[in-house]
Image (cartoon, rainbow, N blue to C red):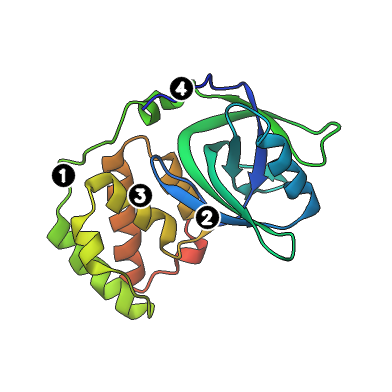
């Protein structure tokens, strides 16, 4: 759903390895470094309140990230801030800008990701029984747990995107999930990663 504010051509960037924000999901974050506390203070003064979540890559940043809108924040006794970001849209990073602000800002292009603003996606090819069977085995193998009743109730997009964000894949695999053009593409990759891990693959080196 298109936001009520204009999407800016430049936003503050928050590099986080191993973390991605997928369409129509939310991401809780602890903010404690002085430069990012300053970033949050500046962002909250804007109409859009957008922060770009993007992974480091090599000596720079990944080509694709996601802008999340600050929808809630609270301050702890130690000065740390707990914030919640709601995904607005993915973006392509054109260039980084380091100026007077202590944090990185980026010139970005929203155009490649118009589908992120059009509402929830469906995945006609999703076989929930097959996905859940693999997921049960994966969770047991990695000593993980989840709310299976909530997972069963979740819509296609919520299920696939939430799993893509929370499962312990490598940063490269997380980036590939983020960059998947459609929900069906992401679900196919997600299942492939789960099945690869179940067959003894070392997913730490897959897409590094």
Q: Which circle's residue, 4 or 1, is located before the other in the chain?
A: 4
Q: Which circle's residue, 3 or 1, is located before the other in the chain?
A: 1
Quadrant of the snapshot with the C terminus: bottom right
Distance from Cα at disc 3 to Cα at disc 2: 15 Å
Instruction: Give the residue pinned by disc 4.
Output: 4
Instruction: Give the residue pinned by disc 1.
Output: 125
Q: Position of residue 130 (x, y in %)?
A: 16, 61
Which one is closest to the eye, mark 3 or mark 2?
2
Q: Secondary structure at mark 2?
A: strand
Horizontal placement of 107 versus 138: left or right?
right
Q: Which residue is painted at 49% across and 51% down in the image?
A: 27
Q: Secondary structure at mark 3?
A: helix
Distance from Cα at disc 2 to Cα at disc 1: 30 Å
Q: Which residue is painted at 33% across and 45% down in the image?
A: 186
Instruction: Give the residue pinned by disc 3.
Output: 161
Residue 28 badge: 2
Horizontal placement of 49 versus 157: left or right?
right
Horizontal placement of 26 versus 30: left or right?
left
Label 1 neighbourhood size at 10 Å, few (<14), some (14-19), many (20+)? few
Image quadrant of residue 95?
Answer: top right
């Amino acid at each position: 759903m298109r936001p009520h504010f204009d999407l800016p051509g430049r936003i503050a960037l928050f590099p986080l390895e191993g973390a991605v924000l997928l369409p129509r999901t939310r991401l809780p974050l602890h903010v404690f470094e002085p430069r990012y506390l300053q970033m949050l203070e500046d962002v909250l003064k804007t109409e859009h309140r957008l922060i770009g979540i993007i992974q480091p890559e090599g000596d720079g940043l990944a080509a694709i990230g996601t802008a999340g809108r600050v929808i809630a924040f609270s301050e702890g006794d130690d000065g740390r801030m707990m914030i919640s970001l709601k995904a607005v849209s993915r973006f392509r990073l054109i260039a980084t800008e380091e100026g007077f602000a202590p944090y990185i800002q980026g010139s970005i292009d929203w155009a490649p990701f118009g589908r992120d603003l059009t509402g929830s996606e469906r995945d006609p090819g999703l076989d929930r029984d097959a996905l859940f069977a693999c997921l049960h085995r994966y969770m047991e193998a990695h000593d993980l747990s989840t709310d299976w009743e909530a997972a069963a109730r979740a819509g296609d997009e919520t299920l696939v995107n939430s799993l893509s964000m929370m499962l312990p894949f490598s940063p490269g695999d997380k980036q590939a999930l983020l960059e998947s053009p459609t929900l069906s593409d992401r679900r196919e990759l997600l299942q492939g990663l789960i099945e690869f891990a179940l067959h003894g693959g070392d997913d730490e080196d897959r897409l590094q």
